[in-house]
């Protein structure tokens, strides 16, 4: 077997470094072994290893893996193309998954199996260049990912409707539960439209603070406020000629809805600090998981704004409403992540299929995709059984006995949202936190 190039091993245990030198001397031409991660930057200035084996804990008594995740991020800042394998004595699957999601190629648990360690390092080193090409292709295609329709009648009817309305310039409102793929559908609409050669700008309305709302969407003129050193176009101008996707439109505070309505009606924006209207030509697509008509009845959403954004209303059914799509989607995600993580093709056993079909999928497609990605990462078998399918139990938190601060926080936020019927401004005020903090926690707990 021909030797590979260079491996950098980073571990504070000198006995492990010695063991790695002996084990890998016939595998790699050059073995760089260091006990302090502080040396990483200096080494990477002189050489580019083919693979890095990175310990996740360097301080005595610290075993939460944060150091490893920190240095993972630092290495990727210096040279993102170097594949990194995490080395940990603590078989924490969630931590390992987090590390891989943040850019690691694989992970190895101590005590290790020599043959498997060598195979993992060789695979990662040899696939490094191939993975870089795949990542570039994936990034190039990510601007307009295509919709995964499934096979159900509900999605077939939706597809027929989308293909009819996408070619027009009609404003479209997409509704559906969290995780059903509203942004993906918006991108599909743009890809099928006559504006597809131009950009689609997504905006998460719930993540924009009220003080920055006008500046972010409409732009600002030089000198409009402190640190406004230059003219800056907003999202509306950036989307000129293309499409603007306003996600979570139902979270926009009532007093800001009139400003948005004015721009939509006039098809022009006035930057903060300026009096000059700037024409904009774009296709508006909005999305929400809330019932806007009910919000109108309660005085929480402007009726005239609803009419403007709701020329065409499309609703994405939840995964519970189209169970026949669960297995086809799971198969698509299995294939996708086997390719991304360099794993052999995997299939589901009959027991695993039954487990997937019986799960309620309150997180919808997002939860299903996360589940399949996790299964690919932590398993090496070609056939995945029901044990390999680790289902998310977070949705049952509200029903469980509260035992942790996280669960208490989840329950409190959920109950307050229910109490104020989704009015996030009142919820934030009741909880004594900022609206932005509340929104971040809603995202975290998938409420």
Image (cartoon, rainbow, N blue to C red):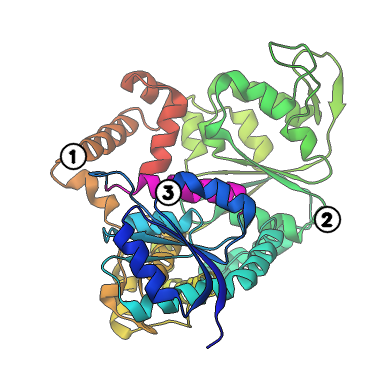
The residue positioned 42% from the left and 77% from the top of the image is: 118
- Mark 2 vs mark 1, foreground winner is 1
Residue numbers of the magenta segment: 63-79
Q: Crowdedness of circle 1 by 10 Å Cα count: few (<14), some, many (20+)?
A: few
Residue carrying label 3: 69
Dot 1 falls on a residue whose secondary structure is loop
Can residue 2 be seen from the camera position used here?
yes
- Mark 3 vs mark 2, foreground winner is 3
> Does 173 sit left or right of 293 as displayed?
right
Dot 2 falls on a residue whose secondary structure is loop
Instruction: Give me the disc on residue 404.
Output: 1
Dot 3 falls on a residue whose secondary structure is helix
Residue carrying label 2: 197
Q: Crowdedness of circle 3 by 10 Å Cα count: few (<14), some, many (20+)?
A: many
Count every numbered label the image shows and give the total: 3
Indicate the position of residue 422 as horizontal and vertical percent values. 40, 32
Indicate the position of residue 362 as horizontal and vertical percent values. 36, 55
Can residue 361 be seen from the camera position used here?
no
Indicate the position of residue 103 as horizontal and vertical percent values. 51, 56
Q: Is residue 207 above or below residue 8?
A: above
């Amino acid at each position: 077997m021909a030797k590979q190039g260079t491996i950098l091993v980073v571990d504070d245990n000198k006995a492990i470094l010695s063991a790695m030198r002996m084990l890998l001397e016939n595998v790699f031409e050059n073995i760089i072994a260091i006990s302090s991660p502080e040396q990483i930057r200096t080494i990477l200035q002189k050489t580019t290893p083919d693979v890095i084996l990175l310990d996740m804990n360097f301080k005595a008594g610290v075993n939460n893996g944060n150091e490893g995740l920190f240095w993972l991020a630092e290495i990727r800042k210096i040279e993102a193309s170097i594949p990194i394998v995490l080395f940990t004595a603590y078989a924490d699957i969630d931590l390992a998954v987090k590390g891989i999601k943040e850019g690691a190629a694989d992970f190895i648990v101590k005590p290790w199996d020599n043959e498997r360690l060598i195979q993992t390092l060789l695979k990662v080193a040899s696939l490094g260049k191939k993975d870089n090409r795949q990542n570039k292709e994936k990034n190039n295609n990510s601007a307009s990912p295509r919709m995964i329709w499934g096979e159900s009648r509900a999605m077939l009817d939706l597809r027929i409707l989308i293909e009819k309305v996408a070619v027009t310039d009609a404003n479209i409102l997409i509704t559906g539960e969290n995780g059903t793929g509203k942004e993906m559908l918006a991108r599909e609409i743009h890809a099928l439209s006559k504006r597809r050669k131009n950009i689609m700008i997504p905006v998460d309305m719930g993540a924009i603070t009220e003080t920055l709302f006008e500046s972010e969407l409409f732009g600002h003129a030089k000198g409009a406020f402190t640190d406004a050193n230059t003219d800056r176009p907003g999202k509306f101008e950036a989307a000129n000629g293309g499409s603007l996707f306003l996600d979570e439109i139902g979270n926009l505070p009532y007093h800001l809805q009139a400003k948005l309505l004015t721009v939509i009606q006039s098809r022009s924006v006035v930057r903060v600090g300026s009096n000059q209207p700037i024409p904009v030509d774009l296709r508006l697509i909005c999305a929400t998981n809330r019932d806007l008509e009910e919000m109108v009845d309660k005085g929480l959403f402007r009726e005239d704004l609803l009419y403007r954004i709701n020329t065409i209303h499309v609703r994405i059914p939840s995964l519970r409403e189209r169970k026949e799509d669960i297995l086809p989607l799971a198969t698509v995600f299995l294939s996708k992540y086997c390719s991304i993580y360099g794993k052999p093709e995997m299939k589901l056993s009959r027991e695993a299929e039954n487990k997937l079909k019986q799960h309620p999928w309150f997180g919808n497609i997002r939860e299903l995709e996360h589940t399949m990605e996790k299964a690919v990462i932590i398993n090496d078998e070609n056939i995945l059984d029901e044990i390999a399918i680790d289902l998310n139990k977070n949705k049952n938190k509200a029903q469980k006995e509260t035992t942790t601060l996280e669960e208490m926080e989840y329950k409190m936020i959920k109950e307050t949202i229910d109490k104020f019927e989704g009015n996030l401004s009142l919820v934030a005020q009741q909880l004594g936190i900022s609206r932005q903090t509340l929104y971040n926690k809603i995202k975290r707990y998938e409420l």
